[in-house]
């Protein structure tokens, strides 16, 4: 008996939970930036990172994989991460919220990736499995008492390994010789670096930075974005988003490889947001016109407006890192951060507006009967 596919009505509550995590994480970002905002009753600032990386990105990844698998029960994984994010917002860094986030990674591994591996094993899926294991390791260490800054390498590995695996799926037809071996070596170095950073922080961070640089080098050389950036329309937009994201990730790798471990201060702020804003959000902006239609079964028409939030994201991140973190100008750090939030909100608002317009056009087309010429 074939499993029943995941209906859109079951996907929407999960997507809404991920959206709630995003909005809550952005609100926490504004609080961390020192803006005069009403403070919630829970320490929302303490869960800003897990909300953004696991509550938002993790829920999106698990939802997309559940849809790819095509079974209802696979929604348990993104449902757990979404519910865990909601609990973090309501109760702060409480045990139930963290347990649900860890359970989501276990379900992602056992319920989704195991079945996908049975269908089509390969290095691309292996990278995504490595990403899910990194998610699990991050939540396990968080439960064991490590602080969020101490688990950042594992959170970064979850994002980087997952995205690199998806890019390998698209690049397999045009890979250069030894491309897969290079990919696996970079993935192994990245995972070993995250492990070493948790066990021996003084030296592990250097290895982790080298692993990031090796992964970026593979992405730049082997990704199809190097060729599609010369195209027009949606392929060029996607390529621009990818290549700029790779540039930010390379800078983060240089900071880790060249300066070692960091858990606070301006270098921590720069490194953290180079990975999770410059790289991760660029990947989300770039892939949204392709992934969202598959998840929602609704078209997201390409338009030049997509470049506006992408440009705002990179411009304000440059101000935040260069003026705020490097030059030490508090106003640059603060208003660059506000611009980051506006870029993400602008992208989400633009996507919602585009989806609504497309739905209205489809409705008008459906209700207007075709004109049949009279027979003379």
Image (cartoon, rainbow, N blue to C red):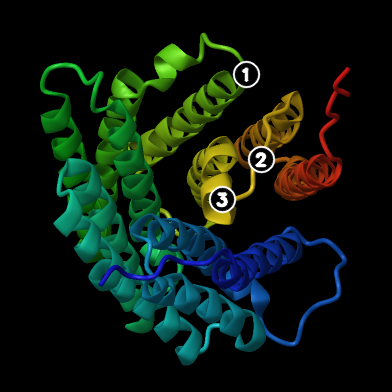
Of callouts 2 and 3, which one flags the residue occurring earlier in the amino acid sequence?
3
In the image, residue 347 above or below residue 235: below
Q: Position of residue 144 (x, y in %)?
A: 32, 83
- Count of number-bearing discs: 3
Q: Nearer the viewer, mark 2 or mark 3?
A: 2
Residue 346 falls in image quadrant:
top right
Instruction: State the SS at label 2.
Output: loop
Which of marks 1 and 2 precedes in the sequence? 1
Q: Looking at the image, which is closer to me, 122 or 142?
A: 122
Q: Position of residue 140 (x, y in %)?
A: 31, 77
Q: Position of residue 283 (x, y in %)?
A: 51, 39
In this view of the protein, which residue sits in the foreground, 369 or 206? 369
Identify the residue under disc 3. 269
Q: Nearer the viewer, mark 3 or mark 1?
A: 1
Residue most extreme to the front: 376
Residue 118 badge: none
Task: Assign the N terminus to one quadrant of the image.
Answer: bottom left
In this view, 220 is above or below 118: above
N-terminal label among 3 and 1: 1
Q: Secondary structure at mark 1?
A: helix
As drawn, 92 above or below 105: below
Which residue does the numbered mark 2 point to in the structure image? Answer: 300
Dot 3: few (<14), some (14–19), or many (≥20) neighbours within 10 Å?
Answer: some
Residue matched to label 1? 233
> Which residue is pictured at 26% across the width and 67% down the height?
109
- Identity of the residue drawn at 57% across and 64% down: 8
> Between 21 and 80, which is closer to the camera in this rendering?
80
Instruction: Give the CA distance from mark 2 to mark 3.
Output: 33 Å
72 lies left or right of 214: right
Residue at x 59% of width, y 24% of height = 234
Q: Is residue 323 left or right of residue 142?
A: right
Separation of disc 2 and disc 1 at Cα?
13 Å
């Amino acid at each position: 008996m074939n499993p029943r596919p995941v209906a859109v009505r079951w996907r929407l509550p999960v997507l809404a939970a991920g959206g709630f995590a995003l909005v809550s994480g952005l609100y926490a970002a504004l609080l961390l930036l020192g803006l005069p905002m009403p403070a919630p009753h829970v320490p929302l600032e303490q869960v800003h990172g897990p909300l953004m990386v696991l509550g938002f990105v993790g829920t999106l990844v698990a939802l997309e994989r559940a849809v790819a698998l095509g079974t209802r029960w696979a929604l348990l994984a993104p449902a757990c991460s979404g519910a865990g994010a909601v609990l973090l917002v309501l109760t702060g860094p409480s045990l139930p919220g963290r347990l649900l986030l860890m359970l989501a990674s276990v379900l992602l591994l056992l319920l989704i990736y195991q079945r996908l591996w049975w269908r089509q094993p390969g290095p691309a899926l292996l990278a995504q499995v490595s990403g899910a294991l990194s998610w699990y390791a991050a939540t396990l260490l968080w439960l064991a008492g490590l602080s969020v800054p101490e688990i950042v390498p594992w959170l970064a590995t979850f994002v980087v390994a997952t995205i690199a695996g998806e890019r390998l799926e698209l690049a397999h037809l045009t890979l250069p010789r030894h491309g897969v071996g290079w990919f696996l070596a970079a993935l192994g170095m990245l995972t070993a670096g995250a492990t070493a950073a948790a066990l021996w922080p003084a030296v592990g961070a250097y290895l982790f930075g080298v692993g990031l640089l090796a992964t970026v080098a593979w992405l730049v050389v082997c990704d199809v974005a190097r060729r599609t950036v010369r195209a027009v329309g949606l392929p060029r937009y996607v390529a621009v988003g990818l290549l700029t994201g790779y540039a930010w990730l390379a800078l983060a790798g240089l900071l880790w490889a060249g300066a070692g471990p960091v858990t606070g201060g301006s270098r921590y702020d720069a490194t953290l947001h180079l990975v999770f804003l410059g790289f991760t959000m660029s990947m989300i902006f770039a892939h949204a016109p392709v992934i969202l239609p598959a998840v929602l079964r609704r078209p997201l028409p390409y338009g030049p407006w997509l470049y506006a939030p992408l440009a705002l994201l990179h411009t304000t991140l440059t101000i935040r890192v260069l003026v705020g973190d490097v030059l030490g100008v508090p106003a640059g750090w603060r208003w660059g951060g506000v611009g980051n939030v506006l870029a993400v909100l602008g992208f989400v608002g633009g996507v919602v507006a585009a989806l609504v317009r497309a739905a209205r056009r489809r409705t008008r087309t459906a209700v207007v009967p075709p004109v049949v010429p009279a027979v003379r």
